[in-house]
């Protein structure tokens, strides 16, 4: 039996082998305990300037400050986010490649006949944060001053009132479909590569309206370039108290709230997931993150991995019911 007492009688070569083996055996735990010890990449499935990009960049800034390692954003738009999600699902599960997304992730099984990854199992939910109402916005100089103005026009001229989104099957697309169902109206969908492009189309009056998370449009609203007609949820925004909720504007059952979250590839060590979950909680508890979220008309709430998994399950089920009642055909 090898004991510490017998070690001095071992040859120098044997001692070197024992030491090397001991160090190698300890590497995985050491690497996990010291995560992150190099830059972390967060893949955003949409272009710069949209709600997910804006919120994720703020979170990345906080995580960089808290951990001392860089959290870098990589924008990979396309195919309603599935290109980016597939990339991260195939990535090394070492905590250095993550993916951000919003409520749209729960829509994916209802958009595509076949996904290039296992929606329920290939990614591990880490946490969700910044819960933002969905807003219906128009150009500040639009003919539509109220939600009822817009609905009346859509009913009088079906399919002629246009709205833009970051792509077919995104949360704004389905939110607009839900509005059409609730009001007996028909709108024309104009998809773009990202929500930010749709916002630019509103600003240039290329399209009539946009459904968007408040985090993606609040800057232009505060700047007087866009006008909010209504917001989802059961209460008005503290930053814009004159804007009615959809229910107050005469349309019920438009209660979609957009959250942003982070996922890691399946197989990522539990210690790393717990550290990341903890760092997100610290970030969301900070004063500047609260001010950032509230300034965007959002709730600076944060939920842990278990609660996030339940939100995903419930959201996926809810969107399935909406999808079944729309004319949307799976791609």
Image (cartoon, rainbow, N blue to C red):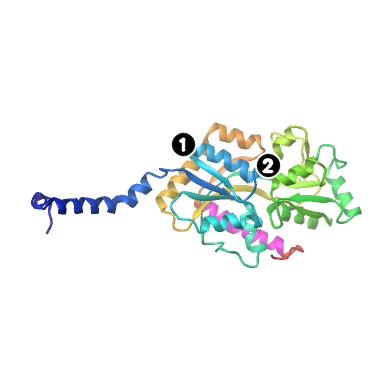
Quadrant of the rendered structure where residue 106 is?
bottom right
Magenta: main secondary structure: helix
154 relative to 277 in the view: left or right: right
Instruction: Name the residue rendered at 64%, 49% in the picture.
Output: 46
Q: Residue 106 versus residue 5: which sits nearer the camera?
A: 5
Q: Residue 244 versus residue 91: which sits nearer the camera?
A: 91
- Residue 231: tell me if it is visible: no
Q: Quadrant of the N terminus?
A: bottom left
103 relative to 98 in the view: left or right: right
Q: Where does label 2 land, which residue? A: 216
Where's residue 299, x and y in %? 62, 40
Distance of label 2 from label 1 (alpha carbons): 25 Å
Q: Where does label 1 land, which residue? A: 66
Asked if residue 161 is positioned above or below residue 235 in the image, the reply reads below
Where's residue 161, x and y in %? 85, 51
Where's residue 137, x and y in %? 77, 43
Instruction: Name the residue rendered at 40%, 43% in the picture.
Output: 37
Q: Residue 51 versus residue 155: which sits nearer the camera?
A: 51
Question: Mark 2 or mark 1, which has the lower sequence index?
Answer: 1
Query: What residue range appears in magenta?
Result: 306-323
Q: Specify few, some or many for label 1: CA neighbours under 10 Å numbering under 14, 14-19, or 20 or more.
A: some
Whether tag 2 and tag 1 are in contact, CB under 8 A, the answer is no
132 relative to 225 in the view: left or right: left
Asked if residue 297 is positioned above or below residue 114 in the image, the reply reads above
- Check disc 1 and report its element: helix, strand or loop: helix
Q: Quadrant of the C terminus?
A: bottom right
Q: Which label was assigned to residue 255? A: none
């Amino acid at each position: 039996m090898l004991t510490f007492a017998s070690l001095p009688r071992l040859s120098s070569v044997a001692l070197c082998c024992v030491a090397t083996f001991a160090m190698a055996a300890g590497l995985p735990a050491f690497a996990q305990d010291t995560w992150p010890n190099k830059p972390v990449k967060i893949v955003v499935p949409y272009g710069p300037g949209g709600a997910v990009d804006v919120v994720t960049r703020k979170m990345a800034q906080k995580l960089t400050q808290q951990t001392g390692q860089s959290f870098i954003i990589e924008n990979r738009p396309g195919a309603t986010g599935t290109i980016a999600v597939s990339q991260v699902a195939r990535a090394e599960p070492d905590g250095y490649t993550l993916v951000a997304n919003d409520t749209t992730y729960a829509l994916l099984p209802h958009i595509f006949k076949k996904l290039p990854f296992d929606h329920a199992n290939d990614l591990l939910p880490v946490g969700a944060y910044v819960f933002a109402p969905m807003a219906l916005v128009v150009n500040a100089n639009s003919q539509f001053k109220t939600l009822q103005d817009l609905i009346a026009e859509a009913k009088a001229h079906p399919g002629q009132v246009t709205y833009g989104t970051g792509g077919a099957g995104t949360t704004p697309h389905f939110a607009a479909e839900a509005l059409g169902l609730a009001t007996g109206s028909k709108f024309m969908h104009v998809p773009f590569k990202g929500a930010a492009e749709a916002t630019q189309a509103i600003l240039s009056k290329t399209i009539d309206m946009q459904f968007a998370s408040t985090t993606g449009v609040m800057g232009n609203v505060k700047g007087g370039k866009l006008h909010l007609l209504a917001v989802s949820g059961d209460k008005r925004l503290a930053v814009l108290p004159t804007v009615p909720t959809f229910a107050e504007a005469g349309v019920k059952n438009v209660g979609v709230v957009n959250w942003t979250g982070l996922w890691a590839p399946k197989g990522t060590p539990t210690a790393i997931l717990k550290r990341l979950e903890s760092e997100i909680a610290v970030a969301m508890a900070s004063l500047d993150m609260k001010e950032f979220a509230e300034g965007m008309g959002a709730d600076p709430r944060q939920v842990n991995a278990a609660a996030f998994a339940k939100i995903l399950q419930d959201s996926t089920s809810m969107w399935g019911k909406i999808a079944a009642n729309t004319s949307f055909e799976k791609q």
